[in-house]
Image: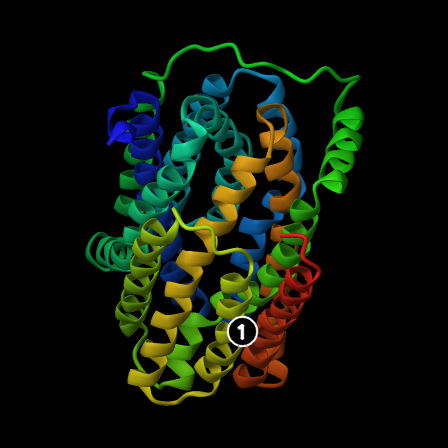
Amino acid sequence: MNLLKNKVFMTILVTDIIQQMAIWIRNIAIMFFIMDVTNNSPIAISALNFIEYLPMFLLTFIGGIIADKYNPKKLMFIGDLLSFISFIILGFFISKGVVGAVFVAVLVSAIVTQFSYPASQKYFKEYIEEEHVESAIGISQLLGSIFFVIGPFIGSYFYFTFGIDKTLMIISVLFLISIAFILTLPNKEFSVLKSNGILDDIKLTFKYIKEKELLKVFTIVFFILSFALGIANNLDIFLVTQRLGLSEQYYQFFSGIAGVGVLLGGLIYVIISKYSLGLKIVYILMGVSTVTVFLEGYSTIPSLSILLQFIDNAIGGILSGYIMSLITKITDQEYIGKVNGLMSTLMYLGIMIGTISSGFIMKNISIVFAFFMASLGFLCCTVILYKTSKKGNF
């Protein structure tokens, strides 16, 4: 396959995998650490996730604009370097008993990612031929999906075996390895859209998306869908410990099986990506998720809950690949950072609202009602895509 001979594609792929490993270990280990020191507080977990998503909401759009203006290789290098430094410093403060430093380190890591990720997409767009975009994204997501299977196991293993101090050092080393690969990328001068500053870039981006009907539709869908995911994903650990009445260590198996679903979904997408299926398959899968997400929160049977998680994540793997490849193909290189930044900003806003709401909904009403709210989000997306398809626009 030509893609496997593409040095830039393979380098970006390897760095993505290394970063995914570091992020999964970080997320799982810190989640267990916070649960231990706060006596399993859902509010604390919501606060942790909120802090992680806050810079994504505030800086993703700006990060996309900067990625379109400056050298992407330097941005990627600086991003991973700052992540490396932040976790070294966090390990020091944790060893001194300063627990609050966890939130600061997560905040720093989340901030720098907003600049490095869109920069990597510039290389992705520039060095991969259009006819190979679907396969490239499918392969990238498929390998990344492996961490939905092994990520919870790896993170749990390191935390319960080595503790938070040594685990943070391992995360730092992974970012250092990623930096080494980034340095091998070619030093290319990318074409830059002329503008009169950031405000002008913002206006140009809104105008560009307004002229692209499909981008407008998926921007709305991303926001609603992310709200639903913000609720459901934030409460997964409590499905295991409270709804199903299992030990928190079962979370890694629960998430691991769900990760197999993401992996299968990625495989299915790679197979069907060469076919033009339109929006029909998208809104049908959204409709299925409307039902499965609600049942996931309602179920008290572990085997049924695992099956529903598996189905939801398989569907997510298919939808993610389809939408990302479509957006990459129809967006001009000069706008790829800005468009991804704006759409991601709205997506993170939805996740933040869903995340911060989920803990309060669960505490004051019930976890079942929280998943019902998430299910309504999927239903809204289904209706929007169905109506769009019936208009004959796509």
The figure's colour scheme reads rainbow
Quadrant (top left, top right, bottom left, bottom right) of the N terminus: top left
Q: Nearer the viewer, residue 196 or 277?
A: 277
Residue placed most toward the observer, 2 or 107:
2
Image coordinates of residue 169 in percent, x first then y, are 29, 39
Asked if residue 207 lies left or right of residue 132, the reply is right
Horizontal and vertical percent for residue 125? 48, 28
| Residue 372 appears in the figure | yes
Q: Nearer the viewer, residue 41 or 313?
A: 313
Say above or below: 362 vs 73. Answer: below
Residue 275 percent location from the top left of the image: 41, 50
Q: Which residue is mark 1?
A: 287
- In the figure, residue 8 lies in which quadrant? top left
Residue shown at the point (33%, 47%) measured from the top left: 144
Q: Is residue 265 left or right of residue 238?
A: left
Q: Most extreme residue toward the left, as rendered?
A: 161
Q: Position of residue 80 (x, y in %)?
A: 42, 29
As displayed, is residue 292 above or below residue 15?
below
Name the residue at 66% across, 32% down.
62
- Count the marks: 1
* Residues packed near mark 1 inside 10 Å, few (<14), some (14 to 19) or many (20 plus): some
Residue extending furthest toward the bottom: 300
Rendered residue at 55%/66% (across/down)? 283
Judged from the image, the secondary structure of the residue bearing numbered disc 1 is helix
Amino acid type, residue under disc 1 in the picture: Gly
